[in-house]
Amino acid sequence: MLKCCLQDHEGKYVEYQPNLVPERELTKHSHSAGMVFEANKATGDYHDNMDGHVFMLWVKHKFLPTMLKKGNKKKIDLVLDNAKYHRTHQTHCPNPLTASKRENIATINALHSKGTRRGKEEVKELTITREGDTHTFQLDDFGKHTRGTKNWKSGGPSLHELRVHTQRVVKKFAPEWLKTELEAFMEGEGHQVIYTPPYLCSFQPIERLWAVSKGAVSTEWRMKRTLPQAFDDLSTVWYGGIGVKTGKIYDGIKADNCERMIKASIEQMDIVIEKFGVRYSGRFGAMQYDSTVPYESGDYDDPDSDEETDDNAVN
């Protein structure tokens, strides 16, 4: 079970387990949005140690109240990467492109029951062309096994075909179902979620900050360090102080550090625009778009994938 560390109302760092605390109690357990959680999987990737449920608890009861209170913002634009727990789909509509046949059939049945007459017909029919031969599957056929080449019409659509069909009809007749749980919640509160392109961590200054922060906190590691102590070490790196283990004096993250991180990210964006922009040209903040330029297939490699941070970002 995930174990987290938050600040209590007195500013002290305390441990708790989100799944054991009633949601209504979470907000008063902390006066900031900061959270450190203990890894319970030795995969080397912290993404494997967080889930969508705990993330949404944090957004609802920590992040949003703190931002509204301390930032005095009426509207928040939350910019996130594509981590799995950032994109948990609403329970009534799993992601059609990753859902099973049974899940997508349930989605189609729900869509069929709420659709217009024209929509009902389009939802329950799936026309497939294979090797020049066309056939229309009906809703009752969707759950059947896919048959071989000679008698494929007597079976059902493949999993991929059904996924594409489900995605298309949901997008057309109930696009709100495709929103992630986070998008639905934030938009319901009058805010906005923006997901950045996948696999482009070098575009995000926060990733550079985390690389520096995690590196510094790791140098302060000692035997039996607790979560509250780890939180203290992180605060020392961010806000300044003396390292408990190393005795190093940290100046904290200053405005000029952040400016360098932002500048480095923008430089990477400009490199990608120049090298892979296709229809886009120019620089970040002053780009031009030419719709007449044709797209060509090709893979993209992050030009900064092996260099996550500026070594001089923190003194």
Image (cartoon, helix red, strand yellow):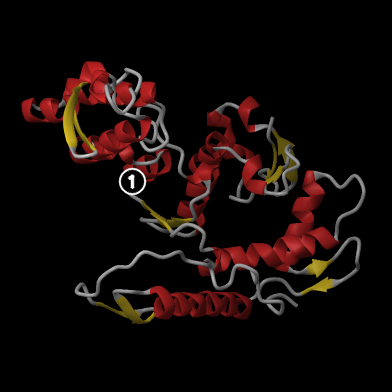
Instruction: List the single residue furthest toward the front.
Output: 150
Which residue in the protein does label 1 denote? 187
Coordinates of residue 287 in the picture (x, y in percent): 32, 79
* 161 vs 47: above or below: above
* Left or right: 142 as drawn, with respect to 259: left
**Horizontal and vertical percent for residue 177?**
30, 35
- The residue shown at (44%, 79%) is 270
Q: Is residue 270 left or right of residue 238?
A: left
In screen coordinates, is 278 left or right of 242? Answer: left
Residue at the image point whose x is 91% and y is 66% from the top: 246
Tell me the crowding category of disc 1: few under 14, some 14 to 19, or many 20 or more residues within 10 angstroms, Cα based. some
Image coords of residue 185 (percent x, y): 38, 40
Residue 310 in picture, x, y percent from top left: 66, 76
Name the residue at the left extreme. Answer: 117
Relative to 303, 145 lies left or right: left
Instruction: Tell me the kind of residue under disc 1.
Output: Glu
207, above or below 68, in the image: below
Q: 166 above or below 239?
A: above
Quadrant for the N terminus, please.
top right
Front-lying residue, 226 or 8: 226
In the displayed structure, 193 sits above or below 17; it is below
Q: Is residue 238 visible?
A: no
Q: Which one is nearer the viewer's eye here, 253 or 129?
A: 129
Quarter of the rendering occupied by the C terminus: bottom right
The quarter holding residue 238 reads bottom right
Helix, strand or loop for disc 1: helix
Residue depicted at x 49% and y 55%: 81
User: How many badges with numbers are in the image?
Assistant: 1
Residue 97 in view in this figure: yes
- Residue occupying the point 71% across, 77% down: 311
Task: Please tell me which residue lies in front, 154 or 138.
Answer: 154
